[in-house]
Amino acid sequence: MSRSYIPQMVENVEDAATTESAVYEYWVKRLGDPRYNLAEIKAYLPALHAAAFKAPLLLIHGDEDRVVPIRQSRIMEKAMRVAGKQVRLVEIEDEGHNFSKPESDLELMTELEKFLAAHIGS
């Protein structure tokens, strides 16, 4: 799961529940509260450090994901491209956070196999 933009992730949780919810508290305990320490949280954002990536990146994301919105993978993909890095984003149609259809699993494995073959050989 991409943590390309953690403050947005916490905002997504906040949108879905109140700041008193267990889910919101879970993320705040692990990442910090963006209302008070956004600068510290941003220090760990992969999208803001895309230029430092040394290996190609494959992102595979369900377009109906309600746990981690697909925009997070799109943010990361854009950051990698702007940094001149190799990236591929595969959006799995009609899938959420955990894929439920065999054809989606097959698409994931096919994309992974192509990516690995291209970057480390077959």
Image: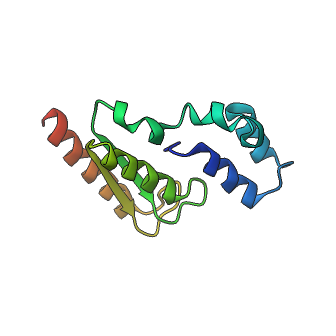
Residue 48 placement, left or right of 54: right
**Where does the image place residue 35, in percent across and percent down from the top left?**
76, 43
Q: Residue at x 37, y 55 (%)?
A: 105
Q: Residue at x 27, y 41 (%)?
A: 85
Vertical arrangement, residue 113 with respect to residue 40, above or below: below
**Where does the image place residue 8, in percent across and percent down from the top left?**
62, 51
State how many labels appear. Answer: 0
Name the foreground residue: 23 vs 87: 87
Describe the colour scheme in one phrase. rainbow
Q: Residue at x 73, y 60 (%)?
A: 15
**Where does the image place residue 64, in percent across and percent down from the top left?**
52, 66
* Image quadrant where one finds the C terminus: top left
Q: Name the residue furthest left.
A: 122
Vertical arrangement, residue 35 with respect to residue 110, above or below: above
Residue 118 placement, left or right of 25: left
Q: Residue at x 58, y 36 (%)?
A: 42
Name the foreground residue: 2 vs 22: 2
**Where does the image place residue 97, in percent across and percent down from the top left?**
53, 55
Vertical arrangement, residue 101 with respect to residue 83, above or below: below
Q: Name the residue furthest right.
A: 20
